Image: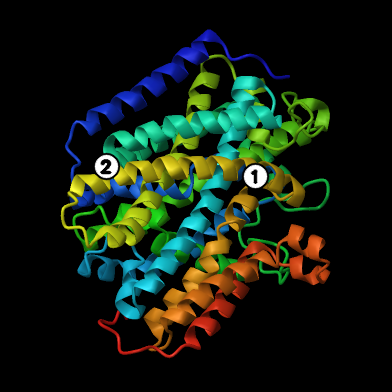
Amino acid sequence: MQTAISLVDWLIIATYITAVVGGGILLSRRRTASMQEYFLGGNQMSTWVVMFSVIATTQSAATFLGGPDYGFRGDYTYLGSSLGAVMAALFVARFLINRFYELKVTTVYELLAIRYGDNAKHAAGAMYLVGRVFANGARLYMAAIAVAMMLFFNIAPQSVILATLMIAIFSLFITLIGGVRSVIWSDFGQFLIYFGAALIALFSLWTQLSLTFPEMISALRETPDGANKLVLFDFSLDFSKPFTFWAIITGVFLLNFGNFGLDQDTTQRLLTCRNAKAGRRALILSSLVAVPIVFVFVTIGQLLHLLYERPELSASAVNGGILPEFNGETITVFMSYILSEMPVGVRGLVVAGVVAAAISTMTSGLNAMSSVLISDFYRPWKKADASIETKHYVAAGQLGMLLFAILLSAMAVLCFYWQRYTDMALLEFALSVMAFSYAGLIGVFFTAIFTARGSSTSVIAALIIGFVTILVQQTYVVDTLGLPVYFKSLSFPWQLSVGVGVSFIVCAAGMNKPARKGIG
């Protein structure tokens, strides 16, 4: 049964929020008058801080809530998908990071201007912005669910909308006061809080279950329905499953390649390092350090399965084997556990972790999205006016963040209804929406890196067709348009693989004019 958050819990949460705001104000004292300082931190950020910022950016609320949800429902195959992330990190480090630094770019899409012209750069930047509104809006929705449960003890539409606005306003404040330097240090702090909270939750669950380690392993290996929840790699050829081994080395690899190398959210952090070597190291280390982190979150879900669904195993089991609900909802078992089972004080620490994940979700996108808007669109448009000072673009970037905060909030509200229609698990839903922009972007960059083909026109066509290819595979589109059922039968890694293949063919169909400078 859900219980109100105590005064002690609120004091802990308030202390955390005060620390975040104070840290942001302290960082804002350092002058950020130039675009290079505001968007790239003057290329002075240390490798280890960037590494943790990348982890916080790529995980945040999606992992905090989605990881336990996946472990509760399924097995360890999501942990196995870390193989695809490590493969992608090595690939990006090998083929892209050096080029970013050699060309001194502010956004990754400037590479396409060198190869195909400004129109291609603008099209890729626009597709990134559309895709990031989708992806970060989905993550913001997940964070808003947690905050709504914490504050209002329900996840009614009005509560989720209010929680969304609260997260957006607070995150916008943090992002505005110090530029990317403030965001990266804030990400580091958020990571420490939310992963520390996960460890506390894991220990709490471990002590609550009166089972020995061998007994837990045996119970997870052989469930009443015959499933093995300890499976790490699934070698089946079931294309409806998102994390089979074959999906991991194809679609999941492509998803992480897009995330690490073509998504300004992540690459902006890598570009704040002192040099390419430091950027490569930060990226590779982030993919490796993320493995035990994902393990912790999935294991939380596994133990929640034992606590809630296996009452015959432990006297401490709750709910009598009935799936836990939160006011009629089963959307996030981890938050239900936090609010109903954790003791006073401990609950406050873990809720602070939820808030940290929520803030990291929002701040990770605002600065990066604004940097693309200003660097790839607004500044080139104003370039003819030599009287404009650099600080004007910094101010424009801050206005851009306000715009994207509004758009992300609107998308989060849309995701509230979208996810319910698809009935996807939270983690799968958060990852699947990333495919919309990545399909076209990956096809275009593969063409640019590995072939001598492509043109400005084919780049634009590939980006559009990649997006549409993912769109026509969505359940709601198939149902609405009456398309064949098999259109919606593929899991998101295979949908992405199809989208990338189609966009690559379309992009490579164009004949490139002599390039100003190659990027291969």
Q: Using the rendered image of the protein, determine whether residue 392 is visible from the camera's viewpoint.
A: yes
User: Is 360 positioned to the left or the right of 78 in the image?
Assistant: left
The residue to which callout 1 is attached is 414
The answer to whether residue 103 is above or below residue 325 is below
Residue 435 image point, x, y percent: 57, 62
Residue type, numbered disc 2: Arg
User: Which image quarter: residue 259?
Assistant: bottom left
State how many labels appear.
2
Identify the mark at residue 339; answer none if there is no mark. none
The answer to whether residue 311 is above or below residue 344 is below
Q: Nearer the viewer, residue 413 or 387?
A: 387
Q: Comparing marks 1 and 2, which lies closer to the viewer?
A: 1
Residue 274 image point, x, y percent: 19, 55
Q: Nearer the viewer, residue 296 or 151?
A: 151
Q: Using the rendered image of the protein, determine whether residue 297 is visible from the camera's viewpoint.
A: no
The residue to which callout 2 is attached is 181
Q: Nearer the viewer, residue 223 or 516?
A: 516
The answer to whether residue 239 is above or below residue 16 is below
Residue type, numbered disc 1: Leu
